[in-house]
Image (cartoon, rainbow, N blue to C red):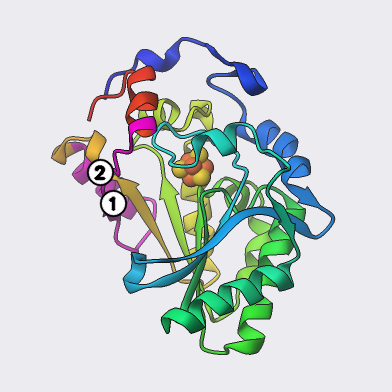
Amino acid sequence: MNSGFRAIFKEGAMDVEFPFDPLERAAQIEPLVMQEEKRIYSRFRASQYYGGIATADAVGCSFLCAYCWNYDRNLKPEPEDSFCTPQVVAVKLLNVARTCSYNMYRVSGSEPLLGERSFEHLVQVVKTLVRYRPNAIFILETNGLFLGSNPDFIQSLRIPNVRVRVCLKGVDEKSFETISGVKREYFSYPLTALIELEKAGITAWPALMGDFYRENDIMEFQLKLKTDHISADLELENLEAYPPVVGNLKKRKIEF
Ligand code: SF4
């Protein structure tokens, strides 16, 4: 992977200087996408991932990954989308699931966990879903920053219906910074999240977009995960090269 992203530049809309501090960004973004217990969502839909999953697309992230399909909305969250209570989110997801005969649920397009308020919102979404569908499976897709920096919150995720997919953004500090836009010293936070989730007995696994790395890099990274006592296998996903995604990757000089 090319390392040309060390240079700092600005993204007009929110004057983001890369690389940035993701905890500071999360603290700025959460108040934009949360109103009391409500969070901004842009749509509710059926998705083919996981063999079929009801999906709520939210807005707002602590990272700005070059390959994010929801990059522009996450760069500058707009209040024109709807603020929804956890109960409304759950009901809309249940309606999608009922129509498609799904039993799996997730939030996508954003980071569900920005801070304490969005964490509590997410937990209430899950609890409401489970009240109506006790066998529901909720896949929490997260960049791992919040849980890695606040491991005390992990206990609240000890709900049998929850599985956590921690989406890793690099195999080392340099690739993490280039892909996510986040300062490289935060590379270890998602790994800490995985370790703490496993200690808490919560089903969790790491996922990585494999397109940017050589086979050897991935094998070495898999070894590192095992050495760090992360026992779940690494899931490798493939890039979906939408035109804006390709544009962002070029901007950061990332080859794939
Ligand atoms: S962590 Fe996920 S939602 Fe956030 S910018 Fe990266 S790909 Fe997008």
Q: Left or right: 225 with respect to 102?
A: left
Is 178 colored magenta in this rendering? Answer: no
Judged from the image, the secondary structure of the residue bearing numbered disc 2 is: helix
In the rendered image of this protein, does residue 124 appear above or below residue 246? below
**What residue is pinned by disc 1?**
237
Separation (CA) of disc 1 from disc 2: 6 Å
Labels 1 & 2 near each other (Cβ < 8 A): yes
Is 239 colored magenta in this rendering? Answer: yes
Q: Earlier in the sequence, mark 1 or mark 2?
A: 2
Q: Position of residue 10 (x, y in %)?
A: 57, 14
Q: Which residues are magenta?
A: 217-244
In the orientation shown, which residue stands out farthest toward the right? 36
In the rendered image of this protein, does residue 128 appear above or below residue 107? below
Q: Left or right: 46 with respect to 36?
A: left
Q: Write the residue at 78% across / 42% down.
A: 31
**What residue is pinned by disc 2?**
210
Q: Position of residue 37 (x, y in %)?
A: 80, 60
